[in-house]
Image: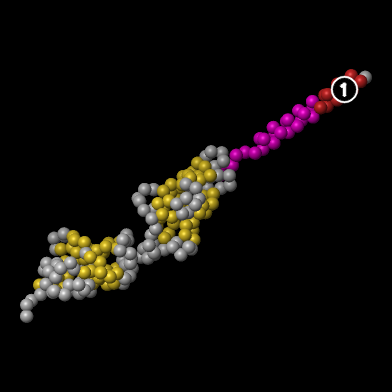
Amino acid sequence: MLLTFISNQSKSILLLSLSILALAQSCKTEYVDFPYNEIESFSIEDPAGNPLHASIVGDKIMVYWPPLVEQPETVTPTIAISERASIQPASGTPVSIASNEPINYTVTAQDGTKKTYTLVFNYNQPILIANITDQQYVTGDIDYTYAFFRVSGQNIITDSLQTVAYLVDKDGMERKLNLATIKSTMITFSRSKATDPAPGLYRIKLVSGKYTVLTDQFEVVLLQPN
C-alpha cells in the first residue's frame, strides 16, 4: 500500500512538472516579435533653439528650414520610432546636409524587417529680387575706394558665403565682384582700381542662396577730362 502511495505521488509530481513545462512553452509562443518599423516623429532645432518638426510622407522625412536664416552644415535630429525598433543613424547623431548625398535612415523592427526613410531638407528661401540702381557708371575716377556698383533688391541673404556677384560683359564673360556692403535690400561692390572696369555695357549676376538673378544692362563710361 505504501508503494502504491509513493507511486501515485510520483505520478502526481510528474504530471505537475509536465503541466508547468507545457504552460511555460505556451507562454513563450504568446510573445511574437513586433513588426513595427515606423518613424513616429522627427525634429531638429533652428539657430534660436526652436524645434522644427518634420512631416513624414511615405518614406520621406520633409524638413522645412525658415527663410533668410543661414542654413547649417549639420543638424542633430531628435527621432521617435516604433516600440522595440531601432534606427540608424540613431537619434541625437549629427548628420551633414552640406553635400548632395542622400541622407537615409533605416528603422529595424524587432522581427528584423526594415524600412528606409530619406531626409529631404527644404530651404524656404523667398524669391530673390535685384535691380541695378543706376544706368550709368563712370570709370577713371581716382576716388575708387567707395562702393561703386549698387544693387537694390529684396530677400538678399546677408551671408557673404551664400551671396556672391559677378560682372557680366556684353560677350557673357564673368568676373567676380568685390563685396563692399550687404543688406537684405541693398548690396554694393567696390573696385580694385580707378580704371576698373573698362568702358562698356554690363550686367550684374547676383547669386544668393539657391536663386540667381541678372540685373538690367547698364553702361560704364570713361571719365572725361575737364
Instruction: Please tell me whether residue 80 is drawn above or below residue 179 in the rendered image.
Output: above
Image coordinates for residue 36, horizontal then vertical, percent: 56, 44
Q: Is residue 10 left or right of residue 74?
A: right
x and y percent of residue 23 in the render?
73, 33
Foreground of the two, 58 or 45: 45
Q: Main secondary structure of the magenta part?
A: helix
Residue pushed farthest bottom?
226
Q: Which residue is mark 1?
A: 6
Question: Which residue: 52% across, 42% down?
Answer: 108
Q: How many marks?
A: 1
Quarter of the rendering occupied by the N terminus:
top right
Q: Quick one: which residue is furthest to the right in this view?
A: 1
Residue 27 placement, left or right of 103: right
Say which of 215 and 77 sits in front.
77
Instruction: Say which residue appears at 62% left-offset and 38% top-offset.
Output: 32
Q: Is residue 220 left or right of residue 52?
A: left
Across and down, in percent, residue 176 comes to 21, 61
**In this rendering, is residue 221 above or below 98?**
below
Viewport quadrant of the C terminus: bottom left
Q: Residues within 10 Å of mark 1 (few under 14, many from 20)?
A: few
User: From what the image shows, is residue 193 above or below residue 85?
Assistant: below
For badge 1, the amino acid type reads Ile
Q: Is residue 217 visible?
A: no
